[in-house]
Image (tube, grey):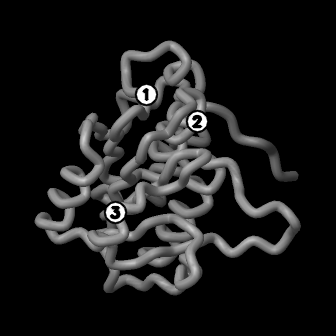
């Protein structure tokens, strides 16, 4: 009979599948208002094993009690840095050879599933809960991608969208 795994047993299972190096994905968080969302994104980034989180603008960054509450001790497991200017962060990543993909819904955005291996290394920019991605970033973007939705609500919670997007991207690399 099958049984649930716990603690170290789960980690042993995940470690067997983990690549030697983090996935070539940098997530850039653009003015995320809720520290709880940021903490959740840290936890997701740790589980996804991405290269880095770049926290920009008003996005909460450690040390921060609300962030730490939802991050559940993953802050030490994720490479992260704070950059006040989102434009500078994106320019720097572009200069390092990253494709820039904005997670946003526009007239010409394409399903995130359209990305392929050749689009990596990739910097995924995730925007503010209300305003979305800073419009100045469209100039620097190589792609604007969306998560197709099928119901009557026009958007997902930013931390949920972040998780879905990361794991869809990782599937392109596996």
Q: Element type at marker 2? A: helix
State the residue position of label 1: 60
In this view of the protein, which residue sits in the foreground, 107 or 36? Answer: 107
Residue 164 coordinates in the image, percent (x, y): 62, 60
Q: In front of the other: label 1 or label 3?
A: 3
Q: Element type at marker 3? A: helix
**Of pointers 3 and 2, the one earlier in the residue sequence:** 2
Residue 132 coordinates in the image, percent (x, y): 53, 54
State the residue position of label 3: 137
**Of pointers 2 and 1, the one earlier in the residue sequence:** 2
Determine whether 52 is above or below 103 in the image.
above
- Residue under the point 51% across and 60% down: 166
**Of pointers 1 and 3, the one earlier in the residue sequence:** 1
State the residue lying farthest toward the top: 65
State the residue lying farthest toward the left: 95
As measured in the structure, the alpha-carbon distance from the residue carrying label 2 to the one carrying label 1 is: 9 Å
- Residue under the point 37% across and 22% down: 62
Q: In front of the other: label 3 or label 2?
A: 3
As measured in the structure, the alpha-carbon distance from the residue carrying label 3 to the one carrying label 2 is: 22 Å
As measured in the structure, the alpha-carbon distance from the residue carrying label 1 to the one carrying label 3 is: 20 Å
In this view of the protein, which residue sits in the foreground, 125 or 9? Answer: 125
- Residue under the point 48% across and 68% down: 170
Q: Is residue 131 visible?
A: yes
Q: Is residue 9 left or right of residue 28?
A: right
State the residue position of label 2: 37
Circle 1 Cα neighbour tier, 10 Å, few/some/many (<14 / 14–19 / ≥20) = many
**Quadrant of res 123:** bottom left
- Asked whether the residues under the numbered discs 3 and 2 touch, taking CB atoms below 8 Å apart as contact, a structural biologist would say no
- Give the total number of marks visible in the rendering: 3
Residue 15 coordinates in the image, percent (x, y): 46, 50
Q: Is residue 8 visible?
A: no
- Residue under the point 38% across and 16% down: 63
């Amino acid at each position: 009979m099958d049984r649930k795994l716990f603690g170290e047993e789960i980690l042993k299972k995940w470690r067997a599948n983990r690549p030697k190096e983090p996935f070539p994905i940098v997530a850039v968080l653009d003015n995320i208002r809720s520290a709880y969302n940021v903490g959740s994104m840290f936890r997701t980034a740790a589980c996804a094993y991405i290269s880095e989180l770049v926290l920009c603008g008003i996005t909460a960054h450690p040390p921060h009690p609300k962030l730490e509450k939802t991050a559940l001790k993953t802050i030490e497991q994720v490479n992260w840095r704070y950059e006040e200017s989102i434009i500078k962060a994106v320019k720097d990543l572009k200069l390092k050879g990253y494709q820039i993909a904005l997670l946003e819904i526009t007239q010409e955005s394409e399903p995130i599933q359209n990305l392929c291996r050749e689009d990596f290394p990739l910097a995924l920019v995730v925007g503010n809960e209300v305003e979305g991605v800073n419009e100045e970033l469209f100039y620097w973007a190589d792609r604007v991608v969306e998560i197709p939705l099928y119901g009557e609500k026009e958007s997902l919670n930013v931390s949920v969208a972040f998780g879905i997007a990361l794991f869809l991207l990782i599937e392109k690399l596996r």
